[in-house]
Image: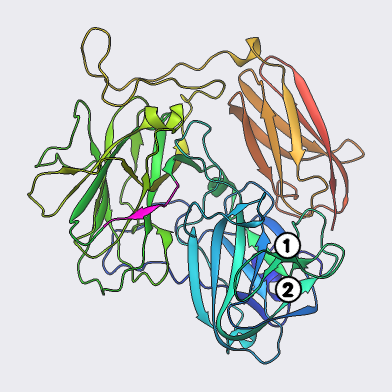
Amino acid sequence: MKPNRSWIGVVFTLSIASLLVVAAVAPRAIGRAPALPGVLAHPSCDLILQQSDGNQPLPLNYREGVVQPIAPPANVAACSLTVDPTYNYGFARLNLVQWDPVSLMPDPATVALRTVSFSASPMPWNPSRAEFYPPVVTKSLPNVAERPGPVAIDWRSEGGYVTMRFNNNGPAEAPTALRYPSGGGASTPLSGEHPVLSHAVCGGDRALQDLQVVQSVMTTTVLSDTDCFELIQRFRVPVLTRLRWIEVAFGVNPHPIYFDPVMAIVDAAGQSEPPVTLPPSLIEAPYAYFVSAPFWGSHFDFDHYITLEPEHDYWLLVRVEHRYFLYSRLLTGGESQDFTANIGPSFKRTAFDSNWIPNRGRALCFRLIGEPLARQMPHGRLRPRPLGEATPDGRMPQPSIATPTDPSRSAALSLRVAPNPARGASFVSWSGAAGALRIEVMDAQGRLVAANSGRASAAGQWLWSGARDDGRPLPAGVYFVRGTDAAGRVASDRVVLIR
């Protein structure tokens, strides 16, 4: 298969029987506020992060499964798998999961990031585009409480027979696919030298790739109960951040929902515990799901954005109305300094106007997705006081902005491209930059083919799509990537583009 820069081209060249997995967990609100300009709804697919063709059939019987890890540390807007046009029947489920590269299993510490159920029978005749709503963000700030890990496409037959396709000697940059037996147990590689599922992974566009997890508690160990009307969690973010959306981890909910529960951010400055009557929320949005399997879910679109300040206390409020079960992490006392500095106490209450009850030894599981702004600490770590701790003169902490250090005094400029070789998109990572960094991509003859305007960040990443600035795909060959910072220092790397 020859890659196509168009997402539609990728889908239809995978196979005449290509399946794009439909994101069944995508909420659709009635009368919700218009979506803000951005990447939540209907993201474009300018960036193909990983793909492979393949014609070898892979039959999966009841409860058997297969996993395709995703190599680039990137945010995912959509993914596809190819179904062989043979006899398929029954039901199947696709989970986008955190992946443990050591055990070669889905990470047992957290539930699926997204989950999808579908009927297997019509799949070979109904290729269609599918999107994760919201997209799955895996890139993370270094100082969050629990950073997310790598991800994988986890496909399971749940009742019936489905035949997939794979390549027994797939592209080297794609990780090896693994198979799971019906009764559980250890995974085993598929047959071949380097087996890879026939698939494609869409990274949306550069705007999506700029988003990061700015705070998270990922370990899902215990569920809330039906006496909860509202749950609330105190937190901080490590850098100045424009918040895009909130995610929480849902357990299975057998009840239909007729109301509009909400997720909200409330100012908690100077509060050791939430008051009975909360102040007006800084931002909120409703959500609605019928949860048939545990997963991380979000809300309907915000109607505006807010900026979260570092070293400032906030409440994350989730109204569950006795109908939703949410995951929390049981605290062990061995949490990291980043965890204890940024994650405060958790509370619940049983009615709208009742007193708050401490959830001792627990932290609500949540993920905040946002855009770190220019005043973040790009080099070095923030060291905020523990939540709720007074300053030495007895005052409660007020919002403050950390001043970036001068990276030119602490590190040499370095630049690296990965994956390398690259079949499509690749990341240009840098560190030690003084001021804005300009990145240029040149062909073997020294001609400029792509460039990235300067970014005032000592360390960061730029996702190059493997195309010219005007969007035309570049041919296979050797390309040179050069970064120049404001001090005139230069770093470079070479990347091999394959088609």
Residue 359 placed where, x, y %?
24, 44
Q: The C terminus is located in which quarter? A: bottom right
Q: Which mark is residue 51?
A: 1
The relative height of residue 362 versus residue 31 in the rendered view (above or below) is above
Query: Which residue is at 13% across, 41% downward?
Result: 278
Q: The residue under label 1 is which amino acid type?
A: Gln
Query: Which residue is at 58% across, 55% downward?
Result: 204
Q: The N terminus is located in which quarter? A: bottom right
From which residue to which does the magenta span run? Answer: 218-224
Q: Do the residues labelled 1 and 2 touch (CB within 8 Å)?
A: yes
> For residue 297: magenta?
no
Query: Which residue is at 17% across, 59% downward?
Result: 227
Question: Secondary structure under badge 2?
Answer: helix
Tell me if I can see residue 4 in this picture.
Answer: no
Q: Mark 1 and mark 2: span between their CA atoms? A: 9 Å
Circle 2 is placed at which residue position? Answer: 14
Does residue 339 appear to the left or right of 261 in the view shown? right
Residue 258 placed where, x, y %?
21, 72
Q: The residue under label 2 is which amino acid type?
A: Leu
Q: Magenta part mainly helix, strand or loop?
A: loop
Label 2 CA crowd tier, 10 Å (few <14, some 14–19, many 20+): many
Query: Which residue is at 31% across, 40% downward?
Result: 361
